[in-house]
Image (cartoon, grey):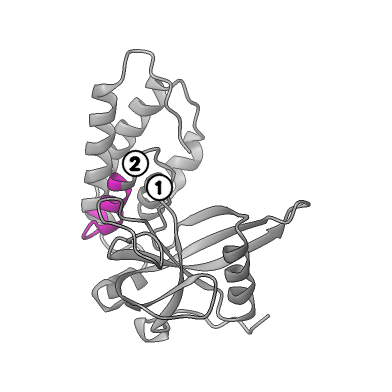
Amino acid sequence: MAKHRPIITPSDVPEVVPVFPLSGALLLPRAELPLNIFEPRYLAMIDDALAGDRLIGMVQPDESQPDDDRGPALFKVGCLGRLSQFGESGDGRYLITLTGVCRFKVLEELAADTPYRQFRIDVAPFAHDFDANVGEDAVDRTALLKALAAFLEANKLEADWDGIEQAGTETLVNALSVMSPYGALEKQALLEATDLKSRAEMLVAITQMMLARMPGDGESSLQ
């Protein structure tokens, strides 16, 4: 395995990264995303990441655009993740966790000889992602927790409120966004939110709209 090299500034990010296109999967800076890898091309991607810098780009397919011979069209913004946990199952699957590093813009796809796709990316528009906890003071944490409580009550779910209360605001906003049961378009909007305050407000608004559409005994659940 290659030596660990910390990603501290935008200049530490490689220009080209392997990309895992996955609808409904949201990764955000410093949040964690568990993944179950079983397709041979993505098993190969994980092998190569483990032997290299352990960086993988997560981008959602854009279903509003036609596919081409290289695969599905992708949204133009994704998030880079570092492979922070790795395990193997008895049936050949990899059980991994990615920890978000920063968002990026997709510039172009390269003609690669790997079974997985590789893209040139630009992280400069999201340089503030490297600074933890930026914008926490502007988040209406009370409104966020109220929306979460309403969602849990409507879906008859339990939560570790002690842990929630102790979590930092950035951690809370991003973790709830990652775990949210919303669709690809909503998750892409959360990913592309300008700042933490905007993401929190969007998360509250989406939750309120979902609750308004639910029957009295809705059975949705967190992923």
**13 or 106: nearer the viewer:** 106
The answer to if 195 sits in the magenta stretch is: yes
Q: Where is residue 43 in the image (x, y as percent from the top left)?
A: 62, 64
85 left or right, relative to 31: right
Q: Residue at x 21, y 52 (%)?
A: 198
Residue wearing tag 2: 183
Q: Circle 1 is placed at which residue position?
A: 24
Magenta residues span: 185-197
The numbered mark at residue 2 is none
The N terminus sits in image quarter: bottom right
Q: What element carries label 1?
A: loop
Looking at the picture, how far across and down is residue 46, in whole percent?
A: 60, 68
- Of mark 2 and mark 1, the one earlier in the sequence is 1
Look at the image and tell me whether residue 140 can be seen.
no
Residue 54, placed above or below residue 21: below
Residue placed furthest toward the front: 69
Asked if 208 appears above or below 66 in the picture, the reply is: above
